[in-house]
Image: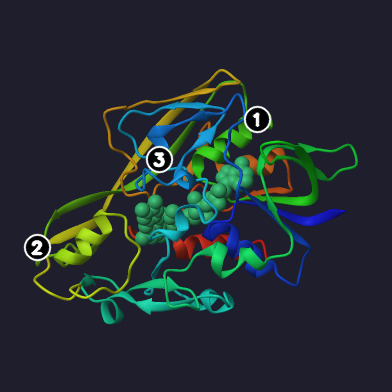
């Protein structure tokens, strides 16, 4: 069978694409659910892992080796990707009509509904039907019929004109055929897929942008260009411990103590890719903590925006993720990911 669309990744980007295409197109989703990357040739890149160190689902594996110093580019091969942590924050000051097409979620107002938190902007948090932070797996993919538990190693054009994905589940390989492929992986896994699929030159550079994020003690003043979230002590502590709770006795107690500020200060970082099997990725500034906000965006490949770059290699390979979006202000990326997904539906 040849699917209309094969979607790679089950985070919020993958969920948005599949949810918006539902009923219009025959769509399969590929994402590692149980596969644990025991295979030869895969490297664990600890520098790409971010909190929850004891949870194997949060480990990063791929063929390339990343030496990016203090830079913070995150890879999460779990079912829900990074999305099930706090990736579900929505900018309510933007046009949010598209969210009403996502049947599985509802949006809480951070300033109104969540104790112990306040923001200078109107932000929302996506929750599932169970009232907890929305998880794409539990809330959607676990019952999705055309879900394939596997890791996509390559995308190739077939002689017949469709695309073929080589998928591994750790012990065996299979081929998924589709007319269109939508890559919804993290940035590092997108780079890996482009290398393995020979869609980039042997040596190339890529770049990302990021609005600098800071953690400081609470101040009552705020620069209106920034997006500042203030935390009361217990909420701050629960976030520090990586807990995913919206409500807890004590969250509303005490003064605001910590500010997390996504500043209007924009930075750019370049990376260099050399070699193959394994490719080695280095950063041009290993001392910088670029990417600390985990809201980096706007991937370019050899100075060409990734969407345009992909259109030059195939008119049927698309990308939805941090890599594709170009936010006009600091803060959540969720709105942009959904808008990007809607362009395909
Ligand atoms: C702690 C934390 C807090 C965050 N807070 C916010 C926030 O407040 N607001 C905000 O907008 N964003 C936030 N983010 C960023 C957030 O990650 C994104 O907004 C969003 O969740 C990204 O979703 P995604 O689907 O593009 O990527 P991901 O959620 O990373 O999903 C990628 C998926 O691709 C799969 N995958 C990767 N490679 C392959 C492959 N080769 N084959 C098959 N499957 C593959 C993975 O298993 C995963 O399912 C936060 C991130 C973190 C880590």
Q: Hey, which residue is sitting farthest right in the picture?
A: 160
The answer to whether residue 311 is seen in the rendering is: yes
**Precedes in sequence: disc 3 or disc 2:** 3
Picture layout, residue 342 above or below residue 269: below
Count residues near mark 3 (Cα–Cα under 10 Å), then give few for <14, some for 14-19, many for 20+: some
Q: Distance between the residues labelled 3 and 1?
A: 21 Å
Instruction: Name the front one of labels 3 and 2.
Output: 3
Q: Name the residue under label 3.
A: 49
Residue 318: numbered disc: none
Instruction: Write the residue at 42% across / 72% down.
Output: 132
Picture layout, residue 136 above or below residue 299: below
Residue 196: numbered disc: 1
Callout 3 touching callout 2 (CB < 8 Å): no
Q: In this view, does 102 lie to the left or right of 330?
A: right
The answer to whether residue 226 is seen in the rendering is: no
Query: Residue 275 or 171: which is nearer the viewer?
Result: 171
**Helix, strand or loop at mark 1:** helix
Instruction: Name the front one of labels 2 and 1.
Output: 1
Q: Name the residue under label 2.
A: 219
Count residues near mark 1 (Cα–Cα under 10 Å), then give few for <14, some for 14-19, many for 20+: many
Q: Distance between the residues labelled 2 and 1?
A: 48 Å
Picture layout, residue 210 above or below residue 232: above
Q: Is residue 260 left or right of residue 317?
A: left
**Precedes in sequence: disc 3 or disc 1:** 3
Q: Name the spot of residue 136 as percent of width and height, x first.
A: 54, 63
């Amino acid at each position: 069978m040849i699917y209309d669309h094969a979607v790679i990744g089950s985070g919020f980007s993958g969920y948005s694409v599949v949810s918006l295409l539902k009923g219009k197109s025959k769509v399969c989703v590929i994402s590692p659910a149980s596969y644990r990357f025991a295979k030869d040739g895969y490297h664990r890149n600890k520098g790409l892992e971010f909190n929850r160190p004891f949870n194997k689902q949060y480990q990063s594996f791929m063929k390339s080796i990343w030496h990016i110093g203090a830079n913070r580019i995150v890879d999460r091969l779990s079912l829900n990707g990074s999305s099930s942590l706090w990736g579900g924050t929505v900018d309510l000051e933007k046009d949010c009509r598209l969210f009403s097409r996502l049947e599985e979620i509802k949006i809480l107002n951070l300033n109104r509904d969540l104790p112990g938190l306040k923001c200078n902007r109107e932000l929302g948090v996506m929750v599932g039907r169970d009232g907890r932070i929305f998880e794409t797996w539990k809330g959607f993919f676990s019952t999705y019929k055309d879900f394939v538990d596997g890791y996509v190693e390559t995308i190739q054009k077939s002689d017949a004109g469709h695309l073929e994905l080589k998928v591994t589940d750790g012990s065996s390989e299979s081929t998924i055929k589709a007319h269109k492929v939508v890559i919804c992986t993290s940035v590092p896994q997108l780079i890996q897929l482009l290398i393995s699929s020979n869609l980039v030159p042997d040596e190339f550079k890529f770049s990302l942008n990021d609005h600098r994020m800071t953690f400081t003690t609470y101040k009552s003043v705020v620069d209106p260009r920034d997006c500042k979230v203030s935390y009361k002590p217990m909420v701050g502590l629960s976030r520090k411990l990586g807990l995913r709770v919206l409500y807890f006795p004590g969250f509303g107690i005490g003064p605001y103590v910590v500010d997390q500020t996504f500043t209007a200060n924009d930075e750019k970082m370049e990376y260099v890719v050399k070699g193959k099997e394994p490719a080695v990725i280095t950063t041009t500034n290993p001392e910088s903590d670029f990417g600390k906000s985990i809201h980096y965006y706007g991937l370019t490949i050899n100075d060409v925006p990734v969407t345009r770059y992909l259109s030059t290699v195939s008119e049927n390979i698309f990308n939805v993720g941090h890599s594709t979006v170009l936010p006009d202000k600091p803060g959540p990326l969720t709105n942009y990911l959904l808008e990007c997904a809607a362009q395909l539906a």
